[in-house]
Structures are given as structure tokens and as C-alpha cells.
Amino acid sequence: MDGLAPPADARTRILDAVEAIVMAKGVPALTLEAAAREAGVSKGGLLYHFASKEALLAGALNRLADHVEADYERVLAETPAGPNRATRALLNWTFEHPEAVCAQHDRAGAVFLAAFHHDPALLDPVRAVFARLRARMIADGLERGRALAIMAASDGLFAERLFRLCEPPADDLPGIRAALEALL
């Protein structure tokens, strides 16, 4: 074994191509032909997986939703049992896992905005993930308003990093986290 990862399957290469095209050139540049060319597949090969531009965007958003949910579940599994575990995991995810904003998320953020502009209904898989996270926060035993305030702050920090709106200085993060933990 030479340690190299196996080549990505066609579907993965196509979704990677969708993200790269949208990030570099925007949704107008996303065509079936451009995605096939960028992914190194024939148009027929692309059509086997995705029948339209909307299907390409939906596929990219479904992958993003799956990634977000799996990433949270990983952090939840690492969080010790006890009161407010789901909410503590959300705080850990927000403050201890900066890798959550990686190159894939940068590209996915571009797709997120593009899909919203193209057809807001395409965001339904991502909305469903956040609805499940919200339900977990509420079911966690913490007073509803506190749980939702923690989630809103976490979402805001994530969005600020993802879209590079305003990165709080690193020395401010412990104070922000302490204020949110006080709600626990």
C-alpha cells in the first residue's frame, strides 16, 4: 500500500466540481457541461448521477447537510455524558473544532449562497439538519430560551467564520464561551 487515497468516485468528483465552479465563477457558470468537464466525466456520466443544474446544487447541499450532521455527531460522541450533553457538545463544536471551517466548507458556503439565490427550497436538507440540532438542544433539559440562545450564538459564530463576515479576536473567544456556558 503506497498510502495514497483511492481516486474519488464520479459522483464525488462531480460534486467537488460543482463547488469549485460556483466558488470560482458563481452559479451562472455552473452548467452540466462545465461540471462534467471539471469532474473529468462525460456528460452522459454526469447525467447518470444528476439530471439538471438543480440536481447538481441539491446534491452539493445534501452532501453539506450530511457533513454538518456527521461532524456534530462526532463531537457529541466525544462529549462526556451528563446534563445538557447535546448543548455542551454544540459549544465544544463551536469553540474547540475550528477545522469545521475548512476548504470544503468554503466551497460549500459558496454553494449554499448560490442555491439560496437560485431556489431557496434547495436548502431544505440543511434546514432539516438544523431543525434536528435545535430539537436536540430543546430536549436536552435546558430551558428552551437558553438552549436556543446558545444555538443562535453558535450559528452566528459559524456563519461569521464561514462567510468571513467578522472573525472575533481569538482572545475574545474564551469570554464569549464563558458567557454562553453561564446559560447552562
Image: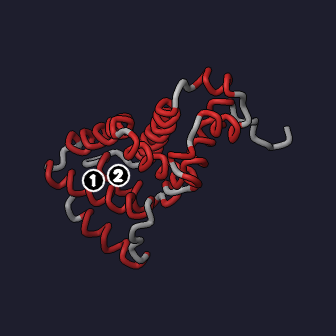
Q: Quadrant of residue 14?
A: top right
In the rendered view, tell whether residue 156 sits above or below residue 118.
Answer: below
Residue at x-position 43% and y-position 47%:
112
Q: Is residue 113 left or right of residue 103?
A: left
Which element is circle 1 on? helix
Q: Which residue is mark 1?
A: 151
* Marks 2 and 1, how far apart at CA: 7 Å
What's the amino acid at mark 2?
A: Leu
User: Mark 2 or 1 closer to N-term?
Assistant: 2
What's the amino acid at mark 1?
A: Met
- Mark 2: few, some, or many residues within 10 Å (few <14, many ≥20)? many
- Mark 1: few, some, or many residues within 10 Å (few <14, many ≥20)? many
Residue at x-position 20% and y-position 43%:
138
Quadrant (top left/top right/bottom left/bottom right) for the C terminus: bottom left
User: Any mark on residue 42, and which?
Assistant: none
- Front: mark 2 or 1: 1
Q: Is residue 139 left or right of residue 99?
A: left
Q: Is residue 21 visible?
A: yes
Q: Is residue 77 visible?
A: no
Residue at x-position 47% and y-position 58%:
97
Quadrant (top left/top right/bottom left/bottom right) for the N terminus: top right
Tags 2 and 1 touching, CB below 8 Å: yes
Picture coordinates of residue 42, whole percent (x, y): 72, 28
In the rendered view, tell whether residue 120 sits above or below residue 107.
Answer: above
Picture coordinates of residue 68, whole percent (x, y): 44, 44
User: Any mark on residue 90, and which?
Assistant: 2
Which element is circle 2 on? helix
